[in-house]
Image: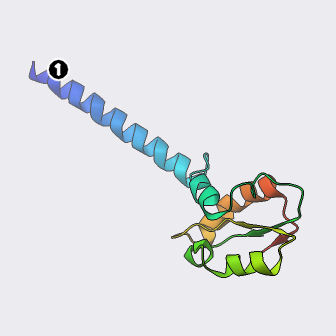
Amino acid sequence: MLRKIGFGLGYLLFLGVSVLLLLEISYRGYWFDFYRGNLTGLNPSGILTDPSRESILVVGDSFTADPRGYVEHLRQTFPDQRVINAGVPGTCTRQHQLLFPRRLREFAPRLVN
């Protein structure tokens, strides 16, 4: 009886560690767009789906992600351009390197800041 319980607990532990490992690998490899919520929250509605204007893509950390920061100043300075804020708080250049190609394909910007 104890052997069956031990085997069951070992099996559950193995499954739990496997699931956590898979989640960690998918997060670090950017298999899914975990930051899509940041992208939609930092940009006015409709700007992400409006390809009629040329795009300026702004990538960065918390300084970029501040809704009252310099990206808003860029939007006011270039009203004819589609300024897309792709800032993600708490990230570094390594994470931007992994996330950046996806944003480039998605928006095809003329300028990247």
Q: Is residue 5 above or below residue 81?
A: above
Percent position of residue 37, x then y: 57, 54
Q: Secondary structure at mark 1?
A: helix
Of residues 10 and 112, which is closer to you in this image?
A: 112
- The figure's colour scheme reads rainbow
- Residue at 79%, 59% (x, y): give it: 104
- The three-letter code of the residue at mark 1 reads Lys
| Residue 72 location, quadrant | bottom right
Q: Left or right: 92 with respect to 82?
A: left
In the rendered view, does 90 fall on the left or right side of 70?
left
Q: What residue appears at the point 71 percent right and 81 percent down from the top-left corner?
A: 73
Residue displayed at 60% across by 64% down: 95
Camera-side residue of 2 and 98? 98
| Among the 4 quarters of the image, the one containing residue 65 | bottom right
The image shows residue 11, relative to residue 81, as above or below, that is above
Q: Nearer the viewer, residue 99 or 83?
A: 83
Residue appearing at x 58%, y 75% in the figure: 66
Which residue is most to the left? 1
Please indicate whether residue 92 sits to the left or right of residue 76 in the image. Answer: left
- Residue 74 percent location from the top left of the image: 75, 79
Q: Is residue 64 left or right of residue 48?
A: left
| Residue 36 percent coordinates (x, y) | 61, 53
Please give the residue where the numbered disc 1 appears in the rendered image: 4
Count of number-bearing discs:
1
